[in-house]
Image (cartoon, rainbow, N blue to C red):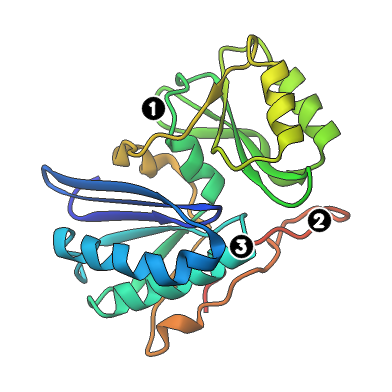
Amino acid sequence: MRGSVLVWDNSSGGSFFQWRSGDRSVARVERYERRRFLTDFPLVLEQLAATTPVDADTAVFFGAGPGSFTALKTGVAMLGGFLYARGVTSVRLLSSLDILSLRTTVPRGAPCVAVIPYRGDEVFLSVVVEGATGERVYPIPPRTVSLAELGAVLDRFAGTGGAVVAGDDLPIAVERALSARSSILPRHYPVSEISLERLDGVPCLGTVEIASEPLMLRYMVAPADLPSGDREEYYVASN
């Protein structure tokens, strides 16, 4: 992948921002209290704007969920305004679980279990195996799982050379489930920078064309292929 690239994900209790153009790169991870996000994050954007010359030629990738409704709503609103002011008219939507899976060092060919908190002891989860040439296979595509279902997933992939990648905002019961299996399925915390070339193998959920109302992107919709009986998952959709 060449040229200016921006990756943005705001699906949980923190935000991930990475930009690169040539040899220049900026990566930043921020954690916020919900009540302070709308006051603090614009200041971070102001700082980023001074170091990341985003323009109409920048390839933008947005983590469209699943994740926190509040985080997705505010994230997409701020991103829309930030990009619109810089002449960016197109945004590619990726699963936030895919972006999370890129923020780890799980070996290619081994399963990566990406976990984002949902509500109570439920989590959003996907399992992906990245091949030698970058192709991605999903033994378990993005979905919501209960604590019991999470345990079954962890047991299924224990001892495979893979790992779990998750932030530090998981419920206590989920943390205990991960700790109980840490010797056979280690826990990785997401790093602050990814190899942007690996984005080429991540499936695109769609493309948003930012028109004259950049803050009117829709959000919180169920994927078209969500199996019957599954709980609704939060995704951003195009206009």
Residue 128, by quadrant, is top right
Residue 116, by quadrant, is top right
Mark 1 lies on residue: 133
Q: Provide residue 62's location: percent of width, then percent of height.
A: 43, 59
Q: Provide residue 5's location: percent of width, then percent of height.
A: 26, 54
At x 71%, y 58%, the residue is 233
Give the CA distance from mark 1 to mark 2.
Answer: 34 Å
The vertical placement of 118 against 192, above or below, is below
* Amino acid type, residue under disc 1 in the picture: Thr
Helix, strand or loop status at disc 2: loop
The vertical placement of 220 against 85, above or below, is above
Mark 2 lies on residue: 231
Residue 75 in sight: no
Q: Provide residue 172's location: percent of width, then percent of height.
A: 72, 35
In the drawing, does residue 58 fall left or right of residue 179? left
Tell us which disc is closer to us: 1 or 3: 3
Tell me the crowding category of disc 3: few under 14, some 14 to 19, or many 20 or more residues within 10 angstroms, Cα based: many
The vertical placement of 205 against 220, above or below, is above
Which of the pair 176/150 is nearer the observer? 176
Tell me the crowding category of disc 2: few under 14, some 14 to 19, or many 20 or more residues within 10 angstroms, Cα based: few
